Amino acid sequence: MRRLLTLAVLAHCAVLAPAFADPIEDAIKARQGYFTLLGANIGPLAAMAKGEIEYDAEAAATHAGNLETLGGYMAAPHFPKGSSNADKPGDTRAQPAIWSDFSGFTARYGDYKAAVADLPAKVSGGRAELGAALGAVGATCKACHDDYRAKDF
């Protein structure tokens, strides 16, 4: 009977645990995961463009396709109010300027989405073509980072 009671309590706790999750922390983790995926795909493309690794058309197309897909993702829900580095110091680099200029922030994200929209078609012509296409994408990343991302946690 004691085991049955213990199992029932543990099962009840497992069911209730999500109700006690912090939605702000979950949003921060989700957006950090999203940006990790972006970096995991931009990194190899940048290395190919710089000549640090061998240019591989198939790999470039795969990474570019992933970035195009990620560009279609609606990331805004992962930026709720209360999730800036002022609200959660040490957890995020997202600056409060995101929320004071949310329309500007989303416009910058729109610039990124436009830059990756046809990226797969632009990377198949070799290192030079890849570099030019990736430069446009990188400029959109930099513009957003300059205004909305702190250098440190």
Image (spheres, rainbow, N blue to C red):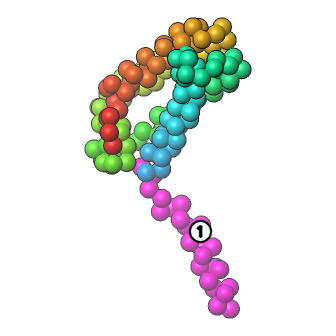
Name the residue located 34 percent from the left edge and 30 percent from the top edge. Answer: 148
Q: Which residue has dot 1 on it? A: 14
Where residue 6 sits, quadrant-wise, is bottom right
The span picked out in magenta is: 1-24
Q: Nearer the viewer, residue 34 or 43?
A: 43
Q: Residue at x 32, y 26 (%)?
A: 147
Quadrant for the N terminus in the image: bottom right
> In the image, residue 110 lies at what x, y percent?
48, 20
**Neighbour tally class for label 1: few under 14, some 14-19, many 20 plus, Cα within 10 Å:** few
**Residue 86 coordinates in the image, percent (x, y):** 28, 44
Question: Residue 8: x percent and y percent?
Answer: 64, 79
Residue 8 vertical placement versus 63 (above, below): below
> Is 37 left, or right, of 152 in this rendering?
right
Q: Is residue 13 left or right of residue 105?
A: right
Query: Looking at the picture, does residue 146 appear above or below residue 20?
Result: above
Residue closer to the observer: 39 or 72: 39
Residue 68's place in the image compared with 132, above or below, is: below
Magenta stretch: helix, strand or loop mostly: helix
In the displayed structure image, the side of residue 7 where residue 25 appears, left or right: left
Residue at 54% x, 12% y: name it.
131
Residue extending farthest right: 58
The residue closer to the viewer here, 125 or 74, is 125
What amino acid does circle 1 point to? Ala
Find residue 67 and report its horizontal and vertical position in percent: 59, 25
What is the quadrant of residue 152 in the picture? top left
Q: Quadrant of the C terminus?
A: top left
Residue at 65% across, 80% down? 7
